[in-house]
Every structure is written in C-alpha cells, then in structure tokens.
Amino acid sequence: QVQLVESGGGLVQPGGSLRLSCAFSGFSVGTLTIGWFRQAPGKEREGVSCISIRGGSTYYADSVRDRFTISRSNAGNTVSLQMNSLKPEDTAVYYCAAGAGVPNYYCLDWTRFNSWGQGAQVTVSS
C-alpha cells in the first residue's frame, strides 16, 4: 500500500524558517519522483520543488529558488523541504506527492503525480 505522510509546517514570522518532511512507503523507487506542491486559498495548486529519488536531480520554482532546499534521506524513504527566508506569499497548504516516470521538465506539474499526502499548513505572518 502506497503512503505519504507529511510532518512539519506551522506558523512563522516573515524571514523565518520551517522544515517539512514527507515519509513515503510502498513505492518502487526506480523511476520515482517526489514533489512538493502548494495551494493558497483562491489560487491554483503550484509546483514548488521536486527530486528524483534514484538520481537525486532537484528542481525548483523560480519563486522559491535560493530559499528552499529539497533533499532525500540516506535511507531513501524521506524527502524534506527546508524553507528559509519565508515570505507571507509562501502561506499555503503544502502537499508532497509521488509520481513514477515523471519527465524532468514536467516534475513541477502536479497533474503528473498520482499519490498525495494529506497536506501541511504553512502560515507566514507577523
């Protein structure tokens, strides 16, 4: 049974940091990509970052590049998103998702992912 469980998130002041983690299980890692997506109220879901589990290639949306870092654990069953220099516009529900055989140039396209975590609220506010 495939499963993704997110942890982390919460309330932070602008300029602060948070770390999200996504523990995944039940997947074949050969062509697996884990992505982080977010959705703010009244806005469309957007890709934030993604990582190829086997190859380790990473990709970032322009809006978060140089502030967010995606990584995988040595054991290979957890993906984390370190978020620094957070801004109010980063406020959203963040989801991790898993997709098999997702081409690199599509890895920020949420429609390419078919397994999703429950979501974690991130609020950036003073």
Image (cartoon, rainbow, N blue to C red):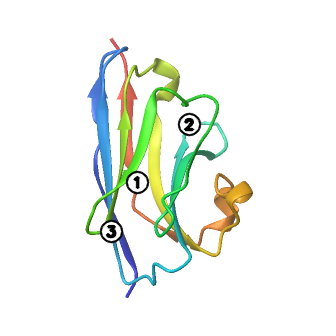
Question: Closer to the N terminus: mark 1 or mark 2?
Answer: 2
Residue at 54% across, 55% down: 57
Callout 3 environment at 10 Å: few (<14), some (14 to 19), or many (20+)?
A: some
Q: Position of residue 40 (x, y in %)?
A: 55, 37
Question: Closer to the N terminus: mark 3 or mark 2?
Answer: 2
What residue does disc 3 label? Answer: 76
Callout 1 environment at 10 Å: few (<14), some (14 to 19), or many (20+)?
A: many
Is disc 3 in contact with disc 1, using a CB cutoff of under 8 Å? no
Find the distance from the CA under tag 1 to the CA under tag 2: 14 Å
Q: Position of residue 49 (x, y in %)?
A: 54, 46
Q: Nearer the viewer, mark 1 or mark 2?
A: 1
Q: Secondary structure at mark 1?
A: loop
Q: Secondary structure at mark 2?
A: loop
What residue does disc 2 label? Answer: 41
Q: Amino acid at mark 3?
A: Gly
What residue does disc 1 label? Answer: 119
Q: Position of residue 15 (x, y in %)?
A: 36, 14
Near-viewer residue (72 or 98): 72
